[in-house]
Image (spheres, coloured by chain):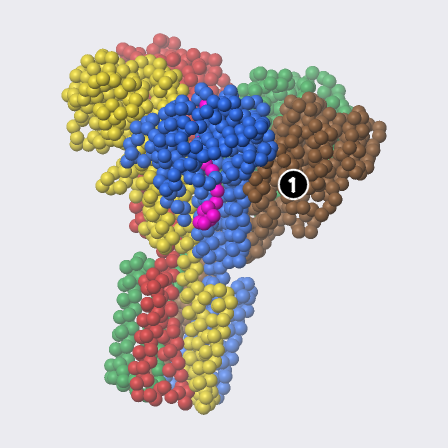
Chain colours: A brown, B blue, C yellow, D red, E green
Amino acid sequence: MVRKSKLSRLLPRTAVKAAVPGTIDYIGSKPEDKVVLHLLDYDAVNVTEKDVSSVAESLPFKESPTVTWLDNSGVHDTKIIEDVGKHFGIHPLVLEDIANTTQRPKMEEYEDYIYVVLKMAYVDDTSKEIILEQISLIVGKGYVISFQERRGDVLEPLRNRIRNNKGRVRLCGSDYLTYAIIDAIVDHYFTVLEITGEEIEQLEDRLIAGPDQDTLNSIYKLKQELVFLRKSIWPTREVASVLQRAEHEIIGESVSVYFRDVYDHTVQVVETVETFRDMASGMLDLYLSTVSNKMNEVMKVLTIFAAIFIPLTFVAGVYGMNFDYLPELHWKWGYFGVLGVMALVAITMIVYFRKKKWM
Amino acid sequence: MVRKSKLSRLLPRTAVKAAVPGTIDYIGSKPEDKVVLHLLDYDAVNVTEKDVSSVAESLPFKESPTVTWLDNSGVHDTKIIEDVGKHFGIHPLVLEDIANTTQRPKMEEYEDYIYVVLKMAYVDDTSKEIILEQISLIVGKGYVISFQERRGDVLEPLRNRIRNNKGRVRLCGSDYLTYAIIDAIVDHYFTVLEITGEEIEQLEDRLIAGPDQDTLNSIYKLKQELVFLRKSIWPTREVASVLQRAEHEIIGESVSVYFRDVYDHTVQVVETVETFRDMASGMLDLYLSTVSNKMNEVMKVLTIFAAIFIPLTFVAGVYGMNFDYLPELHWKWGYFGVLGVMALVAITMIVYFRKKKWM
Amino acid sequence: MVRKSKLSRLLPRTAVKAAVPGTIDYIGSKPEDKVVLHLLDYDAVNVTEKDVSSVAESLPFKESPTVTWLDNSGVHDTKIIEDVGKHFGIHPLVLEDIANTTQRPKMEEYEDYIYVVLKMAYVDDTSKEIILEQISLIVGKGYVISFQERRGDVLEPLRNRIRNNKGRVRLCGSDYLTYAIIDAIVDHYFTVLEITGEEIEQLEDRLIAGPDQDTLNSIYKLKQELVFLRKSIWPTREVASVLQRAEHEIIGESVSVYFRDVYDHTVQVVETVETFRDMASGMLDLYLSTVSNKMNEVMKVLTIFAAIFIPLTFVAGVYGMNFDYLPELHWKWGYFGVLGVMALVAITMIVYFRKKKWM
Amino acid sequence: MVRKSKLSRLLPRTAVKAAVPGTIDYIGSKPEDKVVLHLLDYDAVNVTEKDVSSVAESLPFKESPTVTWLDNSGVHDTKIIEDVGKHFGIHPLVLEDIANTTQRPKMEEYEDYIYVVLKMAYVDDTSKEIILEQISLIVGKGYVISFQERRGDVLEPLRNRIRNNKGRVRLCGSDYLTYAIIDAIVDHYFTVLEITGEEIEQLEDRLIAGPDQDTLNSIYKLKQELVFLRKSIWPTREVASVLQRAEHEIIGESVSVYFRDVYDHTVQVVETVETFRDMASGMLDLYLSTVSNKMNEVMKVLTIFAAIFIPLTFVAGVYGMNFDYLPELHWKWGYFGVLGVMALVAITMIVYFRKKKWM
Amino acid sequence: MVRKSKLSRLLPRTAVKAAVPGTIDYIGSKPEDKVVLHLLDYDAVNVTEKDVSSVAESLPFKESPTVTWLDNSGVHDTKIIEDVGKHFGIHPLVLEDIANTTQRPKMEEYEDYIYVVLKMAYVDDTSKEIILEQISLIVGKGYVISFQERRGDVLEPLRNRIRNNKGRVRLCGSDYLTYAIIDAIVDHYFTVLEITGEEIEQLEDRLIAGPDQDTLNSIYKLKQELVFLRKSIWPTREVASVLQRAEHEIIGESVSVYFRDVYDHTVQVVETVETFRDMASGMLDLYLSTVSNKMNEVMKVLTIFAAIFIPLTFVAGVYGMNFDYLPELHWKWGYFGVLGVMALVAITMIVYFRKKKWM
């Protein structure tokens, strides 16, 4: 079943709060973890990596000509978000949106930075459920600040590429880093879809083997999960579409072609989700039809048994009556005659049902 | 079941009336309450709040440079609407629309004011039903006039913010107040959706536990309620979309970004409603399939019982016949032999059904 | 069931006719009534109202500066249509369309007149069916000619407003009269929808009380009626949309805002029809599910009876056998023992079914 | 069932052929008929009509200022198509398309001619099936060449109008002739739809009377036929839409208004087909629900019989047991007492079922 | 059932890989075959055809003014792709896309070449399944490089046309060759659809003859296959649409009309796939309804047998009771009287069921 937290995550602000616009309020369940500020600063030659204790500590790196990536492992520490707002000059509405983990994926352009909200999708190792975690990016000239909901993400391979100087990332600016982050996030949707695809194939096998209530519940669960995936990837497509137009000065022309690639991938994710939904609907139809078939078969067995034996039992009942005058009872071959009649009736019925292709 | 009043509220004018265009006629059930004219006048420094007895009494506040919010707790007192029309120079068609509580949410721009109609959604405390109440706003330079259907609304937190000078509202003009009102209304849709979401989760639990006619009626009711919610939020989206473009001089450029936020929220409400509709459809499919499954199970039990005992009863019937010459009856082990045959038949049937996985 | 005439009305020309384009041929069933030419001529001061015997008789009124409304109560008298064509200079294709009562609602602009075809919807008092009657309007400078299919229409309240000088109609020209006519027609859709809404609510009550084949047929009939309503209101929306743009010189700027109002109403009608279709579909789903539920219940009762009594009957059958050697028959407590066993079996079954929640 | 030829007609070229683009290959079943070249040449004063033996024979008529209509009764004689290509200077791709009777309706503009492909729809007199026959038109200055698949078409009334000088056709050029041909074709869709409409009404009557497998197959057949009609009329709409814009010099401005009329008709055909599809779906729903209802009724009868008689039979079985000590058997009123108990049981059951509204 | 490989082919990159953008990694199952580089070089006069061992060997042909077609029978040899990149100056992202066989059909324009990815559809001779193989085209001035997944393709007829100088291909440049390749691929979709169409017709026949679980599974399989076909032809339509606009200098104006033809064909494929989907849905509905019908029939047989014989058996049971005082048993005509009553009951039931049209 869809977890409660999922449904409530569809909704941005609770009415109880009666939120004042522009207030930074963490919306979400409070994780225990202390928020870690992880800093990764690099250019083509050097990489600096360390955990900083405050936003202020990262400011020297921001000023340097290198690319600075400041990653927050949580958004429930609103103090950090406020500090970022103060030191980097971020609009209050953006800070509010960062703290609110129920955002719809979107992109907003401000004068000297871009704000991007996306949903990271990954499959929880323990519960095998699809988790959608919100990630906010603030992209400025020479720096990217990312806000996640908890530790652990889908970006570790990207960090390794930076550390080991693989690919182009170390040669480019914060725009390419933004691309690399979004690319990693969108690509991880494929991993999730791959697992979903395997689930679909297993469900198909189970459907063929014979449908039961468990299969049905699994198909239902699958459909609901696809509803949620679709809801988070659909606006991501719009985000990629806008980024590819590279209208903000922070996004260089040369990176635009990479965002086109991301856009193509989001289109592919969207289409795959739609295809999976079509397949899930197809499976439900198959399920229903198969159940109907089985019921039909059960009914046939019942009807065959009833139609053969009920008349026979009736005949036996007749000759079990205790009338004083019941002539057949005294015939010598009465018993065997009746047995013969019964056999005849039974055979007739069987021939009839065979003709109707019920047997 | 959907309340009668809801269905009739979809329709603007009754034919019986054969309304003359431009006539102010109250359309709706007459509430008992006397209409209260509540006035809230503020600037960055001062707040004046009082109930006025007539529209004329509020005119001095309108003339002052402060922001004036005149709130009417009812629209069945057409005298007040006429007065507003006279003193504020409002077009007769607008006055007619205010009195008619079956409007579709819309926005109309006039030379020196803007007319906005929306639906407030909230859950009635007693009946637990979703209520859609119409609210009309007339927004002019320095004043906002709001017309509600009855006392009590979703705007009290906003009034408190004005009284206590929280947030930006006291620093801005009537355009920001309009934003704040619309924002409060749209945000309240989330509260309603949150309650609906909980209802969905409870329905899912009940579905899993075992479907009954009540669950079915609840799913049906849920679907109908979502139809109505969708019908009122969909055009609200268009209203927010137009306001965000800030083409009328009353809406300042700086407030435009806030209306974009409202627009984002209406999009999120629309998508959530669609998602809920998808989920409700999914539940209905699950319901139907589960009922089919249960019926199949019932049929199997019936068939198993019938197929095992009907042949046995027949055999018993045969040896209950009163033929003079029925040799088996006189065999010493006849009875036990027959019992043995019966056991054999029963076991065969059981094996057969086990093979078919019916048991 | 949908009346035959309705289906055939979807189709403009019959093939049998192999119509020559530009020929005026009445398409429709011939009503008995003589066509009445009703003339209403007015300005702010005077009203002249009379039945004229020929189109020529109305020409002096047309020439005068007053607004002239010539209303034809039938289109099967093609002579009148020809006369109108001759005296008012109307294009042959328009005359052909007027006579053909199977038009799709549309608007065509010609140099000095506008041609509008709409469908009037009303509920027949006797048959309680929704009637869609075609009305054609020719709107020129200072005159409006309307062609209806039969006597009696939804425009009488409008005529009363003209006679009694209520509202703005006497102060305005033929464009406002056109608006007033179209407004009356569109508003009458609401009346029809109100009646349909009541029907839906009654159907819902009947569904809850217990579904039968009649309810089903009613839902089916409702859905078909909504299909037809939708088919005639959908293009009406386009007509209103074009009129509101006021691009033809006959439509004055000041009337444009009124056509916007009509457009809003057509949108509301369209949305309400769609909502009703959604609700009708919802009811059909509910119907089907409820039937499934009932069937399930019936099956349970059958299965419970069969599963309890068939084994008992078998036991009774066993001790009704006539074997010479059947020791239990001679036991003293044999009978009561068997009764006890039977009771035990019955109780076991009941417990079992209670556990399965079938009882 | 849909005829095989229909399905294969959806597909333009067979892979077996591996066609070289620009090759004229007849695609379709070979009719036996010899292709007839029928020539109709006219102006306002004279009409010449004759069968010509070769394309060359028609060239003098083409050169004359009269309008020349050359009609081919078949496209399997590729020699004629080649000749047309040679004498009239037609592009090889067009010649290839003419021979290929599986085209999608379309219009292509070339420098001095227009190529139009449409599907003629008519109901075969014998099989009562809807036939879709391809017709290609080459429209040049002063001539129209039409290619049909077989003799007999829907254009005979048009030819009569030309012969008898009815309507405007004799006064206009090849553009009006093109309009008249297309108009005749589109109008014939209405005839087909009229017949389909009658079929729908008959199906509805049969549905109400009681559904059987034949009704079901007929609804299925109807739906498939509508799929094919829709597939051929939908692109026809686009063709009419382009022609109405009259952008090619061959189409005169004055004929444009007539093409608008054709366009309106195609829209009406499209909408009617959609409406019919909606109705067919509605009938299928009604069918399914009615079958469910009937099954429910059958189940009730079965359950009532079983529930009343199975307990009674059990009681009879009990007193048919042969126990030595079975006291009730020896009571004086035992038999009548048992009969009374049985009657009581039966009445109780009947009351119970009446309460459940099963009887 | 849909093969596993199909589902996984919907997804471009696996997360396990955590691919660095711009890396050439073969994605797909490794075929055993050695990749063959097949070169076809031609102009109007000469044709050279040979297998080359390396990309370098083909470079002299590229430089010559003839048209060079270099065809790779596999993409798992990434060395070749790298060589092509080096010698022809291809962008790294394109090389990456070539190696990745899970691309969505698309077209990308670069300064001096065009990159096109398509899916070739053909039916596997052995498994009778629809195979979708990726083909990449790099189109430059005077050369076309194609990359396929394995040996054997749908292009052999085209090669024969080049060898035998049939049609226009030898007279035109690389743009026409590109057209010819894409045309061959799109045309092969028709072959696949033709086979699918035959399958649909066979399924219809089987449905009419009597539905079973196999038919159901086949319909399900068909629907899933159509989902995949649709997914690959839909973006192909966009590709053809862009190519027809001929905005890149490599595509000559004169070839544009041919791409329009390809576009028309893709539209026809898309519509046919949609039609087939409609038909498959129609078949599923027919299937479900037919199963319901059959079940109804089975139920009727059961009910008739039960309702006739259960009361009779009861009567026989009554007179099989062993009461001392059971007067009817001693009547002379008791037995025959009872038989008569039984006959009466049976006849009554039969008449009743006939009236209900169950027999």
Task: Identify the image quadrant of the N terminus of chain C.
Answer: top left
Residue in view at x 35 percent, y 32 percent: B78
Q: Can residue D219 be seen in the rendering of this structure? A: no
Task: Identify the image quadrant of the C terminus of chain C.
Answer: bottom left
Q: A29 above or below E239?
A: below
x, y percent for residue A159: 77, 36
Residue in view at x 47 percent, y 54 percent: B215
x, y percent for residue C272: 39, 37
Residue at the limit of the structure toward the right, as seen here: A45
Residue C138 falls left or right of residue C56: right
Q: C347 above or below B238?
A: below
Quarter of the figure with residue E28: top right
> Is most of the magenta stretch helix, strand or loop?
strand
Residue at the limit of the structure toward the left, as seen here: C53
Q: Is residue B127 magenta?
A: yes
Nearer to me, A56 or B46: B46
Residue in view at x 24 percent, y 13 percent: C65
Task: Give the SS element for disc 1.
Answer: loop
Q: E299 above or below B253?
A: below
Nearer to me, B160 or A46: B160
Nearer to me, D250 or C74: C74
Identify the amino acid type marked 1. Tyr
Q: Is residue A343 magenta?
A: no
Q: Chain of mark 1?
A: A
Find disc 1 in the rendering and name its residue.
Answer: A26
Number of marks in the image? 1
x, y percent for residue C306: 43, 69
Range of residues picked out in magenta: B113-129
